[in-house]
Each structure stands twice: as structure tokens, then as C-alpha cells.
Image (spheres, rainbow, N blue to C red):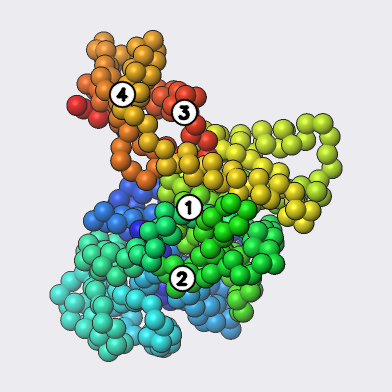
Amino acid sequence: MSGIVAIVGRPNVGKSTLFNRLIGERKAIIDDVSGVTRDRIYGSSDWNGRNFTVVDTGGFVKSSVDIFEAEIRKQVQIAIDEASVIIFLTDVTTGITDLDEDMANMLRKSPKRVILAVNKVDNAERQMQANEFWSLGFENVVFISSISGGGTGELLDMVVKLLPEEATATDENQKSLPKFAIVGQPNVGKSSLTNVLIGEERNIVTDIPGTTRDAIYIHYNKFGKEFFLIDTAGIRKKNKVHEDLEFYSVIRAIKAIEEADVCILMLDATVGIEAQDMAIISLIQKRKKGLVILVNKWDLMEKETNTARDYEKQIKSKLAPFTDVPVLFTSVHEKQRIFKAIDTAFEVHQNRCQKIKTSELNDLMLDIIEKNPPPSYRGKFIKIKYVTQLPLYYPAFVFYCNYPDQVKQPYRNFIENQLRQHYNLTGVPISIYFREK
């Protein structure tokens, strides 16, 4: 189980440096997501076998002095609402400021787990000065230097300890039910889709709180289909979010992706696929979740013979190389292809869970590899001897060979395409590893 870790603090305490340290050292990929109003940054990190998403709330502050503090407070409030663990970053060189006091008051009132990290502690004198921060009243305090990396291991140990454990479902059946999340930018029709799916028969809805306080699992059970819908709709219903709608929706989407098996990404047909959608897709891929793309508001489009085909082609060209993704054209308003979307999500879920027999894999893939061997390395032939699927929650395959590091990306892509051609892996990101036997 993963979670969301948000870094909060006033400007210039080193939030972005710490963010880069937490995800960069682990060679994680940084996502620079350009929002509509300001840049939002989030990335993934892992420590001691736990994988989590780090959100940097830096750079969200408006420059004019009068709304400066209010803006920071708003960010902190969103982080409190949505993150599993909050790193409250302060700066030893300035000591405790009024703004730090204000934020500490907000964070102490919240039920969330907070770590107070005192930054720029890089010598004995500053170590002494840092002790004054205990007066802010937090149980988990750590002294760090995000530039040199001092203390960040201790900080990560603390984060992993405080991340929520995986929720234990009360019923085995509930555990095995697929979890679908509807994600996408504001105003694409997520709420409407949720409402159409749930329909008027409210008795089928039971709200089961997820691991984190706010993720609501809607238990759907009718028309012979049973699954959990992770409710990310209603992003704009929270008050005081106006300015930070984009940031709020990003954190909300990350949270839904973390919890889901399959993500249904909704796009607005009249707008097309944007940078923020691409960022959400890249996170879905990295988290190895299933993906179904719904192009909503299709009823508003002027259509010719091949409009849908051309539109799909355009979307897939942006998704390359991960183009094996189902794209559906829907209109929630006209109730067009809504249930087809759920059927497709079930198919993707099945593709993601399938286990292929080792003997079958070897018979098929070794024959293909023999006919199309990898290019030789310094005159030596790369021999792939054996293939097996790893026992993970998504399709991952290991190819054992004599020079695993010399198998280049084009050949890896060729192997992936062969697997996709012979097995139904539509909508599912897969991993391929080459290892020495």
C-alpha cells in the first residue's frame, strides 16, 4: 500500500530541495506538471520496500504581500485534507517565525500524522539552535540538511513508519472486488458519470472508508456487476478551494490512483488531451494500474465518417509507446456507452490479473527470440535461455540471459510488442526485466 506525503512550510525553507532529495536519490522520475495557474510538482519515492508519492507544495504562493500568508494557509489546509503524512519543514537559520507558529497551530489541530523537519542543520552550533523547535509541540521531530542529505534517512524511516497500513477489508469478497477510480481534470463529467452509474437506487450504495480518511469506496452491485467505485468526484464541493482547484484535483487524483486497480481517465472531447492528463497517465503507468480512456461530451462534437478513428489516433500518438489502451467515446449527458466503459474496465482488470504458465511462455517467447535474436554485444551473442512471469499484482516478466545489461531499449520494446500481440494485455502497463541466470 502506498500513500501521499506532502511537504509544507513557508517559502525559502528548502521544500523543493528536500523534495528533489527524497525522490531524486532513489532515481525516481520527477513529474513537472504544468497546471493552469502555477506549476505543481509531484513524484514517487520508495524506501525500505514502501512506495509513496511525494507532493511539493512549494511555489504555490502568490507574490503580493496581502494574500501571501492566506495562500500558504490554503495550501497547508489542502495538504492536511488529502495527505497521509505531512512533513512540516522549518529553517534553523531564521528560528521560529510567526508563520511557522501559525502553521504549527493548524497542523496540531489536524488528525494527520505530522513530522517536524528542521532544515539546514549542518554543524554542531546549529544542532544546538535547532532544539528550540521542540517548543512547537510535535512528537516526531528530525534535524536534517536537505542540501547535503544529512538526516534524510532518518526522516524517511519516520515517514514509512507513519504511513497507514493497508486497510483490512471486513470480508474476503470485498478484498477481491475490483476497484475502479474515475479521474480527470475538473469539469470533464466525473460527478455526472458517478451519478449515472449509481442511479436512483441509493440502497445499493454503502460507503466504506478507505485507508485514508477521505477516499470513499462506493460499493456497486447491480446488473450482475459488482465492484468498488473510488469516488473522486465532487472536487469543487469543498469550500475555499477556488484558487487551488488544480492543485486540489491533482492531489485527489493521485490519491485515487494509489487506491485503484483500474483508472478510468475522463477527457473533454471539446478540449482534447492536455499536459495535466498526460501527467496523470504517466503516474498511472508508473504505478502499474490499468487504464481506460473515456472521451466524454462526444455528443457536442461535429462528426464526419472517421472523426472517432482520427481522434483516437491523435490520442494514441501522444501516449506512445504505451498505445495499447482502450479509448471509448461517451456522452454521460446522453447516457451513451456508459456501461460499455464499466465492461471495458472489467476486461482491463482481468488482463492485469492474468497469470501465464511458465511452460507456455517459454514455448512461445523462446521460439520468437530464436527467429529474432537480440543484436550481438562486442561480437558475443546474447542468449536468452528462460522466461517466467513474476508473482506481482501486475504483469511483469523476467528473461534470463548471459548479458542482461546489453539488451537495448528497441529490443525490449520488440519483446513487449510480442507479448501484447499474443496475450491480451490491453490497458495494462507491463514490466520486462533481463537478469543473469
Q: Name the amino acid, label 2.
A: Pro
Please name the residue that numbered disc 1 is placed on: 178
* Label 2 close to label 3 by CB (< 8 Å): no
Q: What is the spatial separation of the Cα atoms under label 1 and label 2, in whole angstroms?
A: 16 Å
Q: What is the spatial separation of the Cα atoms under label 1 and label 3, in whole angstroms?
A: 21 Å
Tell me if residue 97 can be seen.
no
Seen at 73% across and 55% down, the residue is 332
- Given residues 125 and 230, the one toward you in this image is 230
Q: Name the amino acid, label 1.
A: Pro
Q: Earlier in the sequence, mark 1 or mark 3?
A: 1
Q: Is residue 279 left or right of residue 167?
A: right
Q: Badge 4 local density, few (<14 within 10 Å), some, or many (20+)? A: few
The picture places residue 117, in percent across and down from the top left corner, at: 30, 74
Q: Badge 1 local density, few (<14 within 10 Å), some, or many (20+)? A: some
Q: Badge 2 local density, few (<14 within 10 Å), some, or many (20+)? A: some
Q: What is the spatial separation of the Cα atoms under label 4 and label 1, in whole angstroms?
A: 28 Å
- Given residues 163 and 346, the one toward you in this image is 346
- Given residues 69 and 334, the one toward you in this image is 334
Tell me if residue 342 can be seen.
yes
Q: Where does the N terminus fall, quadrant-wise?
A: bottom left
Secondary element at image label 3: loop
- Given residues 150 and 424, the one toward you in this image is 424
Q: Earlier in the sequence, mark 4 or mark 1?
A: 1
Secondary element at image label 2: strand
Q: Earlier in the sequence, mark 1 or mark 2?
A: 1
Please name the residue that numbered disc 3 is placed on: 423
The picture places residue 289, in percent across and down from the top left corner, at: 46, 47
11 above or below 25? below
**Mark number, residue 359:** 4
The picture places residue 257, in percent across and down from the top left corner, at: 48, 56
